[in-house]
Amino acid sequence: MSNRAKLSLYVPEPNARPGEQPSFDHLEIPAAGAVRCPDIGAPEHELRDLPYTLIRVLDEQDAAVGPWNPKLSTDRMIKGLRAMMLTRAFDDRLFRAHRQGKTSFYMKSTGEEAIGAAQSLALDQGDMSFPTYRVLSWLMARDYPLTDLVNQIFNNAKDPLQGRQLPILYSARDYGFYSLSGNVGSRFGHAVGWAMASAYSEDDKIALAYIGEGTTAEGDFHEALTFASVYHAPVVLCVTNNQWAISSFAGIAGAEETTFAAKAIGYGIPGLRVDGNDFLAVWAATQWAAERARSNRGATLIELFTYRAEGHSTSDDPTKYRPADEASTWPLGDPVERLKRHLIATGVWDEEKHASLASELDIAVRAAVKEAEKIGTLGKSKPPIEQMFEDVFEEHDWRLVEQLREVRD
Amino acid sequence: MAAMNMIQSINSALDVMLARDPKVLIFGEDVGYFGGVFRATDKLQEKHGLKRCFDAPISEGGIIATAIGMGAYGLRPVPEIQFADYILPAFDQLVSEAARLRYRSGGEFWAPITVRSPYGGGIFGGQTHSQSPEAIFAHITGLKTVIPSNPYDAKGLLIASIECNDPVIFLEPKRLYNGPFDGRHDQEVKSWAGHEHAEVPEGHYTVPLGKAAVVREGEAATVLAYGTMVHVALAGIEDSGIDAELIDLRSIVPLDIDTIIESVKKTGRCVILHEASRYGGFGGELSALVQERCFYWLEAPVERVAGWDTPYPHAFEWDYFPGPKRLVNALNKVMQD
Ligand SMILES: Cc1ncc(C[n+]2csc(CCOP(=O)(O)OP(=O)(O)O)c2C)c(N)n1
Ligand SMILES: [Mg+2]
């Protein structure tokens, strides 16, 4: 050994663990309306301030302000609010169904509902999203039938995925919702390929992909960005930074050193960092990136800055690794509340209308669960056994023919 | 001695090795403060310090690549891959790097890593929390693949794996973590309490790699199994009323060929049981070995009982999972011939 200083291994740690005081004081949160909105034709090298700030539209007085205000019609905002509220009602009811033994697994998206709802409505029919398990609100915004969701979760005889998938790993092609898989990250590159295929075919469709901040560590993320950059793929690539990846804080994915939006800089594509709990900001940034993609200017990376307000899944207890009251100190509020207050502030909504919508949605969810229960919950009803062997290949080979025969005996 | 379930005995093996050897370190997704999604590394960070057991980014390729680099430097990393289904993003690192580093560098570098990973079904985990990928590792020369079936073996085999200078894939049958599941899914869940192999020494000991265990002696037929299927096999043998010998392979590379041959020569009949899909599964290799070495002693063709050649289907968990009934059928078949 020389007389140089000894090295030491650095391992990031969050600033509060259970029993400690949670704090988000280190976050720099610019005022709503403070961030500039460049022309969609601006070259990437003129956009390099945007990954380090936070695009926000809804201010503390519940007004929509600044250059990113998408100036949405009331109808659109109410549609978005409805999709978010429906997502929350559905999540609560189905989480409880798991506790009652009606299914094996469930995951909520509480606190992140604005993302899927705004993006689903901002994109066109025919565009394709490549979701994570936390964007149920995409489907809710497009009126996917609730009973079909529950049938999938119960894996019953009417499950649209024939009992083959873990609950909530939906697939809904007609709703612009690509097939989910249990592996995280592995579809990020599919979105780029889909977008390249659209460009190759001289079509006018674009793709949008989601990845969790934790999963940006996978090679899939970096490979997708490389291809998106090289081929100017018409794709909107979104990182949902909800601060946690099961028990690992975002620092384990590199958040202490830079932002997730700033990863775009190394690939030469625009990076936007957006308040993910602000329905209007998510909409506006998505529309900006989508227009850029549609005008053949290539990909954009959007970091949606949000917070996973509840546990990772039904298998998780977040009080084991983060302060129990951390969610309540999150400085960007709740997306449903914020849009609701904005609608009230603009005079088109009130508490009464809100309460009656909430109860209407609750009734719809209950009815869907009832209907699915009539068919059967997990294990009580299932698709015909042939479905285990269907779709392995387009046509069975001899092994599957023999095995189906054996399983029937 | 202490009564331990399989999670506790694995935790104990890691604890013992962290205390004994400063070159041992653990990292993986959620293994640090939280102690792992199955609690296998519970309290190890608190006890041994942040840099001995810490969280890794969600990058299986990165986890294995850095483990190999650490191993080449001289450490003994014990990375965890949260589910064996998620080893695949690291496959190239295992196959092209870990398995060949010593060979291609003429012995200058090697990778003494032990990759722990929960595997197998029976927990309603769906397509990507249920698979049994052991055969694809067995196919790769240069990797060892170890699969315990009880708490005592798990600890002893894990310590032996960590002390081994070759890369080891250590597959933990997650359905056995809390009890000896025998495939009778409609019966009450059993715990390890009172099981003879749940009495585990608190200190250091090893169970050698490449040494099978004869779990049940018998004369009529030989059943080869590992992991969860050892318990399923016991149940199936019991249900069949046939006096079968049951061998728990404990590791598939290295393989205890002598114990297998001795048993098949004695019984003249052989059934192989594994959870993984049948086609190209490790049962194919076992069957070929038995046929090559015991052909003149065999009274019946070797039978294989395995998962179907489909992805692991969530709703059809118990139609897919090879339970005792399918073993009974296979035993009856080899006895008829
Ligand atoms: C390839 C792969 N590795 C590990 C896992 C286990 N796993 C499931 S979700 C998850 C955390 C993902 O965190 P993040 O990307 O931040 O998404 P979030 O759950 O926060 O939405 C992990 C590690 C997995 N499903 N797939
Ligand atoms: Mg996350």
Image (spheres, coloured by chain):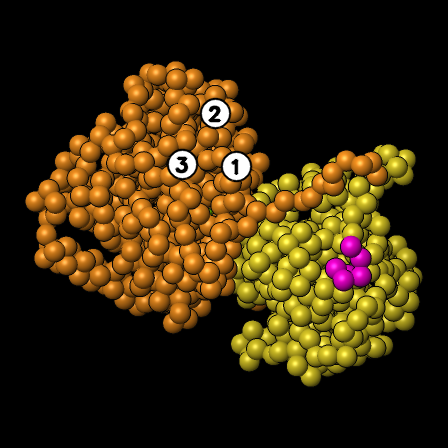
Question: Separation of disc 3 and disc 2 at Cα?
Answer: 13 Å
**Quadrant (top left/top right/bottom left/bottom right) for the N terminus of chain A:** top right
Q: Which chain is yellow?
A: B
In the rendered image, residue B59, in percent from the top left (x then y), is placed at 59, 43
User: In the image, is residue A307 above or below residue A122?
Assistant: below
What hue represents chain A?
A: orange
**Relative side of A290 to B185, left or right:** left
Residue at position x 37%, y 63% in the image: A95
Q: Chain of mark 1?
A: A
Residue at position x 17%, y 48% in the image: A341
In the rendered image, residue B233, in percent from the top left (x then y), is placed at 71, 72
Residue topped by disc 3: A303
Q: Are marks 3 and 2 on the same chain?
A: yes
Q: Secondary structure at mark 1?
A: loop
**Relative side of A323 to B68, left or right:** left
> In the rendered structure, which amino acid carries the disc numbered 3?
Glu
Q: Chain of mark 3?
A: A
Residue at position x 61%, y 79% in the image: B190
- How many residues crowd mark 3 within 10 Å: few (<14), some (14–19), many (20+)? many
| Residue B38 position by quadrant | bottom right
